[in-house]
Amino acid sequence: MNLVEKNHTRVNKASGLVEILKEKGPEACQKMISHVETTDPPLYAKLGSSQSPNFQQGESRTEHTSC
């Protein structure tokens, strides 16, 4: 498997996870966001910086963000 195929597979898995979370609703999204916030703060910060203008550094996204 080459690098492009590996990345494509990873993108498909991530996309599938987001779709599952959307189907399960806001509570599932909040749980996932909280999990990322506690387990991988640098990733959480990076994802937060690409969100809507409502997100400000230092605020908890779990208060106003959904999938």
Image (tube, grey):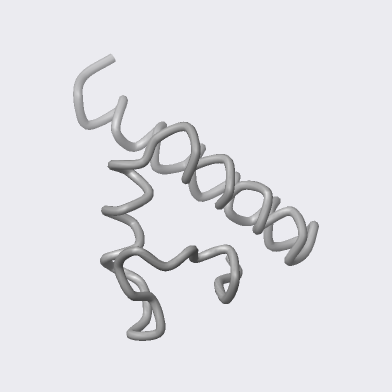
17 horizontally vs 13: left or right: right
Residue 42: x percent and y percent? Answer: 28, 42
Residue 38: x percent and y percent? Answer: 49, 38
Residue at 39% from the left image edge and 35% from the top image edge: 40
Considering the image in quadrants, where does the C terminus appear? bottom right
Q: Is residue 52 above or below residue 48?
A: below
Residue at 19% from the left image edge and 24% from the top image edge: 3
Of the pair 62 and 17, the residue shown nearer to us: 62
Considering the image in quadrants, where does the N terminus appear? top left
Furthest residue toward front: 58
Residue 23: x percent and y percent? Answer: 76, 61
Residue at 55% from the left image edge and 52% from the top image edge: 33
Of the pair 35 and 17, the residue shown nearer to us: 35
Furthest residue toward top: 1
Q: Is residue 25 above or below residue 52?
A: above
Residue at 36% from the left image edge and 72% from the top image edge: 51
Of the pair 8 and 52, the residue shown nearer to us: 52
Furthest residue toward bottom: 53
